[in-house]
Amino acid sequence: MKNDVVIPKLGMTMTHGKVVEWKFNEKEWVDEGQIVLVIETEKVTYDVEAQDSGYLHIIAAPGDKAAVGEAIAELYDSEEAVAEAASTGAAVPAKEAVAKQQTSPAPGGGAASGKRPKGVRITPTARKLAEVNNLEYSAIQGSGTNGRINRADVEKALAAGPVVSSATPAAVFDGEVVDGKRVKDVLPLTGMRAAVAEHMHHSLQVSAQLTTMGEFDATELVRMRKTLVAREAMLGTRITYTDLLAYIVTRVLQDVPLINSSIVGDEIKLWEDVNLGVAVSLPEEKYDAGLIVPVVRNAENLTLTEFSLQIKALRGKAISGKLGLDEITGGTFTISNTGGFGKGYSFNTPVISQPQSAILGVGSIVKRPMVVEDEIVIRQVMNWSFTFDHRAINGAPVGKFLAILNEYIENPYLLMA
Amino acid sequence: MRELMYLQAINEAFAEELERDEKVFLMGEGIQTGTFGTTTGLVDRFGPDRIMDTPISETAIAGAAVGASLMGYRPVADMMFSDFMYIAADEILLKAAQWRLLQGGTQQLPCVFVANIGGYRKLGNEHSQCPYSMMLHNPGLKVVIPSTPYDAKGLLKTAIRDNNPVIFLYHKGLLPVMGEVPEEDYTVPFGVADIRREGTDVTVVATSFQLFWAEAAADMLKDEISIEIIDPRTLEPLDIDTIMTSVRKTGRVVIVDEDTERCGFAGELATQIMERGFYDLDAPIKRVCAKNYPIPGGIMEKFVLPQPEWVVQAIKDVMVD
Amino acid sequence: MEFGKEDLIKLYVNLVRTRAFDRAAIKWLATGKLLSFYHPAEGGEAPGVGGTTFLRKDDVISPHLRGHGLPHMIGKGVDPKRYMAEHCGKATGFGNGLGGFHSAMDEFGMFGGTGTLGSCFPLSAGWGLAAKKNGTGQVVVCFFGDGTSNRGTWHEAANMAAVWKLPIVWVCENNGVAQYMPIQDAYPLEDLANMASAYGMPSAVVDGQDVVAVAEAVMAAVEMARNGDGPSFIECKTARFSAHGIGNPDKLHGKDRTTEDIAKLRERDPIVLFRTSLLEKGVLTPDDVERIDQEAVAEIDETEKFIDESPFPDDPALLDAALYAE
């Protein structure tokens, strides 16, 4: 036996009510006529009386909104029935129910409507025709206004065959098996993903990359950053570890210029300009997040706050997809801070962005026991991984680079010097 | 087959229905004479009690039609110019249209409001309107706008026999148009569109007099574009199925309608097409309508009322898009 | 028309029933049973009751807004149960719960009320036209207030009715005030009956608080119309005891009507006047009066029970069925 507790209609215009507070706990006995909860409308808060008696099973939590007449709790005649209702999840919390409704694809849009490539100009009927035929249409040259793909374009592409298996057909999601393995989902290797794949592979093919790893004692750097963050208003920007690292690395690159070089033809060019690439991870989409490396030009001329502002601006542009070509090319060295990926992401072997000669990766800063003056103490430790092109650089300059870098990080006050 | 003028076809429909059913009678200003010829001569055959000349009293004519229909008669209120229907808005839009539902569907109001529509006569804003969006906006009315003599006769007979209030709007520009009209009794059902020309590239839905512009445009473009022309004939009930079948074939739509563009029938139809067939569209829908100005008197009306070249341009536009 | 004892008692009973339903409507509006709004008839019952009680069943009436037509319906012989059920939104109402206070009872010659005042005139012209065409002596009696007479539709319809000699009796219930507007500021002459002379219609001004005077005048006009002599106009000088509508302020030009004003109007309560006269003449005894009151109370109870037991309509398919006829 089950009775619903519903949002009552309190006025001509009321459509929804918000749960403010439950006066009883889950599974508690409620008598008919007792105030069981308080709801809020645009206009009033209102005590809702139970219309029946029973053990309470709450569906809508405080803060949840529900439509007038919608069940926000149930009253059962036994505690077991409540437990069963709760465990089977027969009642879906209102919030999730709403969210589910909103994400369901629009009728008529086909099963693939949520997985369409963005930014492709195509007419509705052309898109439908392409999807029905599993045609990957993003590469079609449209003949309509601004390159819009129309039905005739798709028909032409279909006639030209062969049909390329689309990343988006509904059939893929329903039990595709490749080499005896069941496919969970398929991502198109296009756009940025294709570019990254191509670049990484190319980089490893054309250079002799060697990675060395270690750790810095970043205790002072952490302290310094705290101070800088506390002065955010004064500086006009919130200084990040990436900012600090970029600033320090730029200094060290000028001390050890071979690291800031490229092989061009049969020469190694040592660059006067320090154009520092800073890897930016884009907001997470399905399964993954995009990667892009905007370049801070002539970093050697920048103060720490200028660095910070520039990196922020570039990151913003990267996320909104507005980076210009000159903002992602021409780098001479790259840093990649993977601290944002969490503590599980420690040492790695960063891949050089061609045609540069080296890349520095750092991980998150964590507290670790360290031996300092024969005592075991707790220090803030930053892992680093440094990949260099052994064709251009030998071990000695790398050792020098890392030693100076270590000095600055352990004693950032040297930056004053 | 014999040919009749559009106005003769209307006149003949009246005569046949007056003959067929003694409950049918006509009233309106000067209808015994017949300002546009649509009722001329009927009084000689049916007498002044059934072909009733009225004072200039639009609200009384329309209200009396509603009242008499409630008592079992089949009055036809000739409102002369459709512009004059604004005067009787209460009687037509609130009474005729909505009375039945407010009485729980217990009654019938078999009345017809007949009036002419349309511009291109340099008559200005109060003798040139196509005010059917107003009628469509008030649920309960059926709206008929024939474009040929055949349809005018067949649809008017259906209108008089219908047990609901019907707005029958004939276009001034069509009155002298000749067309085939069979001698034997026939009616044209409501809610059945007429495919006037078959084509595969673009669907042109045109109403009433605008069918002329649509056909002229199709003739001009016939070597480059295959145009399907549809005349809905009745706007309520609307044969959306025939239109959608065409849209699914062509993916491109131009709607040509003489009513003012804003909030007009063309906008309504465009929305219905979008709702039912967004995924069948290959280009944005284009409307060719009267521009959003009062219809000027004199030659300036050519800048407001739809012109054939506007239709040609719109068809080209949807083909390029 | 000569009224016998039974006729007089019938008039009195209809007045008492009208007052009872009027009060019930006010009460049910307050308790939420009666939907929408209500414009009481109190003080102005006599023209409606007097003008309808002796009509033929197939005569057509267009009721006035006061009392939402209750005086006219009761006089015409309609059982108010289904009208009140409709007003309460019930599926058992005359309009199946779709009409509210607009209600039609075709078999009693009442094809429905209107919300836009003054649309009664052209519609009555249509009913009159149909009645004339029917050729059975059927008459239309159109009731309207002094305020409604200000509409332009009056001119068109009165003119058409006069020109075509339609069998229509125009009954103006002049209670002196249109919502908040005193009639002396809305019409330049003393009597609205003057409006008839422009169309060559015979007219009469009667004491609208004297139900017998109203009945005599209206029925004389009805006989003329039945005989094919065309329309005529009866002005009944009556009163409105309450505010225009329940919940409205009782004002004229923004100023309250005073208790003295109202008390003066109440001195000429049509029911009290008629009762006193009937008791004096010995047509009624005090016992009769008591019994008639009790019967009215019983009828209200029965109506309330009917309404309470009636369901609300809740099937949207009703809308489709009601939109267009087959």
Image (cartoon, rainbow, N blue to C red):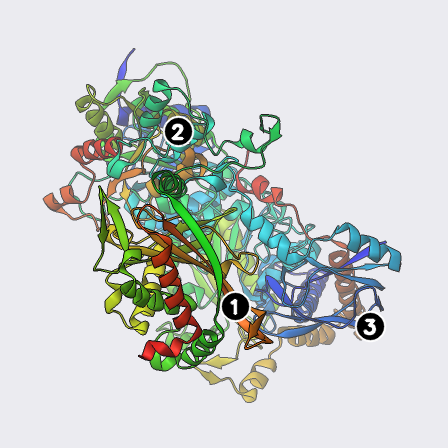
Looking at the rendered structure, the kind of residue marked 3 is: Asp
**Closer to the camera, C170 or B184?**
B184
- Chain bearing tag 2 is B
The x and y percentages for residue A254 are: 27, 64
Q: Are marks 1 and 3 in contact (CB under 8 Å)?
A: no
The x and y percentages for residue B97 are: 46, 45
Q: Residues within 10 Å of mark 3 (few under 14, many from 20)?
A: few
Circle 1 SS class: strand
- Residue of label 1: A381
- Residue sitting at 65 percent across and 55 percent down? C86
Q: Residues within 10 Å of mark 1 (few under 14, many from 20)?
A: many
The answer to whether marks 3 and 2 sit on the same chain is: no
Gap in angstroms between the C-alphas marked 2 and 1: 72 Å
- Residue of label 2: B243
Question: For the image shown, how many numbered marks are present on the structure?
Answer: 3
- Chain bearing tag 3 is C
Residue mark closest to the camera, 1 vs 3: 1
- Residue of label 3: C287
Inspect this view and state whether residue B176 appears: no
On-image quarter of the C terminus of chain A: bottom left
Q: Is residue A59 toward the left or the right of residue C149 in the image?
A: right
